[in-house]
Image: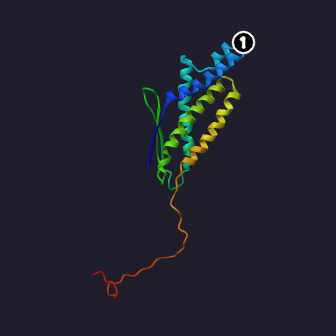
Amino acid sequence: MKITFTISKPLAIEAVKSDTYIKGSIDSSTQQGADKLRYNETAGDITVHERKLAKDFVRGVERLKSVYVDFFSPNHQSVGDTSISASYSGSEGSASITIVVSRRFNGALTDAIANYSQQYVEEYMTYQWWLSAGQQPQAEPHAAMMKDLEDRIRKSFTISSPLQAKAEYSSVNGKMYNDDGTDFTGN
């Protein structure tokens, strides 16, 4: 089964900008002269911010791929049967994720995986923003949310491999008969 979905770079960047704008606005309104603090912690449209957000988007997608790999733990039978890839579009830079699953998969959960994956990248980018701004207390809730999303993604991959046979046997023999009960000879 092939699963394909897109992680939107513009949505992820907007999520970081919204989160940091709210925090910057609160700091500015509660502290006199906090305009410089607000400027430094709020992700904006300046080129240095855009470059950092673009870099964190790619890193977030690549980290997300490793979450998928953790789930698919290959064995000697499946190592070449499962593939995970991401390609980035040139115009807006969104990531198209393709996962080829070699085992049975509940396809009804593809939307959940796509939504959790988008949110995971957004949380990763926001986490990285707060770390680079020196705001460890602001980063911690995003790290906890990333862990929760990793668990949700793993649970959404309800892959069920074929069950092992419960009955043990050493061999199976059979004999064919004609309609009249005589031994079947192949004629």
Q: Is residue 33 left or right of residue 164?
A: right
Locate residue 140, reporting x and y percent: 68, 32
Relative image position of residue 146 (x, y in whole percent): 62, 37
Residue drawn at x 66%, y 37% is: 144
Q: Secondary structure at mark 1?
A: loop
Could you tell me which residue is drawn at 52 percent across and 76 percent down? 170
Residue found farthest to the left:
187
The picture quadrant where one finds residue 69 is top right
The residue that label 1 is drawn on is 32
Tell me which residue sits at (50%, 60%) in the image.
162
The one of 59 and 16 positioned closer to us in this rendering: 16
For the C terminus, the image quarter is bottom left
Vertical placement of residue 144 versus 55, above or below: below
Position of residue 72 relative to residue 123, above or below, is: below
Q: Quadrant of residue 129?
A: top right
In the picture shown, does residue 141 fall above or below 70? Answer: above
**Relative horizontal placement of residue 180, taking residue 20 as reference (left or right):** left
**Image location (x, y in percent) of residue 67:** 57, 42
* Amino acid type at image mark 1: Gln
Instruction: Pick out the residue farthest to the front.
Output: 29
The image's colour scheme reads rainbow
Residue 114: % across, % down? 50, 40
